[in-house]
Amino acid sequence: MLASGIIDVLTAARLRIRSLREQADEQAGFSCASRRLRAVSVPHGKAGDAMKNQRDKIELWKDAGLPGGLELLRASCFDHRYPAHFHDEFVIAAFARGAQRYRVSRHEDIAGAGMVMVIAPGIVHAGEAAQRDQGWDYCAFYPSLSLMMQIADDTLGGQGEVDFGRNLLRHDPLLAQQMLRASAVMAMSDDFLEKECAIYEVLGNLISRYAKRAGRTSAAPSVRADVQRAIEFLNEHYSQQVSVLDVAASVGLSEFHFMRTFRAKTGISVHRYLTQIRLSRGKALLAQGVSAAQAASSVGFFDQSHFIKYFRTHFGITPGSFASGCR
C-alpha cells in the first residue's frame, strides 16, 4: 500500500512537471504536444521495456473533412523506431524539440528543432531518436500529390510536377512554428473552415518558398519497367496470398534475380513493400469505420494479431487508436 501511494505521488508529480513544460512551450509557440495526444503503451515481456514505451506519445489520424481526407500526425518519440517505409503521399514534417536521425537510401542526417522536412511520395525512409534520452517532438502532414498540384497551380503557376529537389531538410524556424500551430488547430478545433484555412496557408507557404514546377520530380528515383510492373502486380493482388514466384513470373524474371533487383531499386524487400500496401489499405478501411478484424482479413493479413503487430511497428500505435482518432 505504501509503495503504491509513493508511485501515485511520483506519477502525479511527473505529470504536473510535464504540464508546466507544455504550457511554457505553447507560450513560445513551439509546442508539438496536443491536448488530445494520448500515450501508447506497447506490451512487452519485461516491465522495464513496457515503461520505456510509455514515453512514446503518438497520435495519427485521418480527417475526412479536410482536402483529400488528409492524414496527420503529432508525436513525442523516444523509443519508437520507424522501419524503412514509404508513403503514397508527401511527408511534410516540422520538428519542435530534440532530434531525429533519419535515413533515405544510403543518406543519413539529423533533423532538429526549427527544421522542416519534405519527402516525396514513394521515397523509402526510416527514423529514430538521435539520442534515446532526449527523443524528438514533431508533427507531420501527408497531403496527396493532387492536393499539392492544386495549390502549386495557384502559388507557382506553370505546369509540371511539384518538385522540392533533393534537399529533404530546410532550417526555417518561422515555417516550422507555423506548421506546429496548424497541427494544433487540426487536433483541437472542431471548425472545419479554420482547419482548411490553416492547412492551405501552411502548404501554400511551403510550396511558394521551396518548390518549383518540373516535368518529373527530381527527388524520386527512376524505376525500371519490370520493377514498376511488379509494384502494379502487388497493388492488384495485395489482398491475396502472394509468393515471390508469383510476382517474379509476372515480370518474367527468376525469383532470386527479381528479389535482388526489386530491393536494389526500391530500397526494401518485396515482403516489406507488400506489407506497406496492406497497411495503407487497412488504414483507409479503419478510417471508414471497418473493424480491425475485418480490415486485416480484407487486405491480406493472416489474422488480426498480425495486422496489429505490423501496424504498431510501422506507426507506433494500434489500429484501434488510429480508428478512434479519425474524424
Image: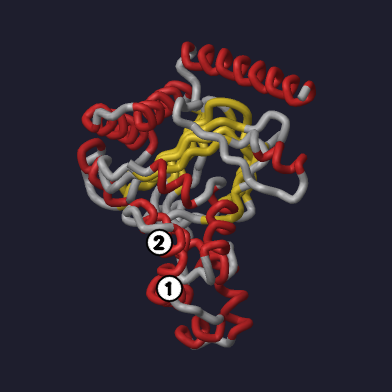
110 shown above or below 172: below
Q: Please name the residue that numbered disc 1 is placed on.
A: 239
Q: Please name the residue that numbered disc 2 is placed on.
A: 281
Q: Which percent across, then down, holds residue 137?
A: 56, 30
Does the CB distance between marks 2 and 1 fall below 8 Å? Answer: yes
Residue at screen point 39% across, 54% down: 286
Q: Residue furthest front?
A: 1
Q: Pick whichever of labels 2 and 1 is earlier in the sequence.
A: 1
Residue at screen point 42% across, 63% down: 295
Residue at screen point 68% across, 22% down: 8
The amino acid marked with disc number 1 is Ser
User: What secondary structure is found at the residue carrying circle 2?
Assistant: helix
313 shown above or below 58: below
> Within 10 Å of the Cα at label 1, are there few (<14), some (14-19), or many (20+) other Cα atoms?
some
Residue at screen point 46% across, 52% down: 219
Where residue 209 sits, quadrant-wise, is top left
User: What secondary structure is found at the residue carrying circle 1?
Assistant: loop
Where residue 71 sits, quadrant-wise, is top left
Instruction: Evaluate whether residue 264 shows in this view.
Output: no
Q: Which percent across, then down, holds residue 76?
A: 57, 33
Instruction: Evaluate whether residue 78 shows in this view.
Output: yes
Left or right of residue 1: residue 190: left
> Within 10 Å of the Cα at label 2, are there few (<14), some (14-19), or many (20+) other Cα atoms?
some
Left or right of residue 86: residue 206: left
Q: Which percent across, then down, holds residue 202?
A: 34, 31
Q: Which percent across, then down, holds residue 58?
A: 53, 38
The amino acid marked with disc number 2 is Arg
Q: Nearer the viewer, residue 166 or 121?
A: 121
Q: Which corner quadrant holds the N terminus? A: top right
The colouring scheme, among rainbow, by chain, secondary structure or one colour, is secondary structure
Q: Nearer the viewer, residue 147 or 209?
A: 147
Cα gap from disc 2 to disc 1, whole angstroms: 9 Å
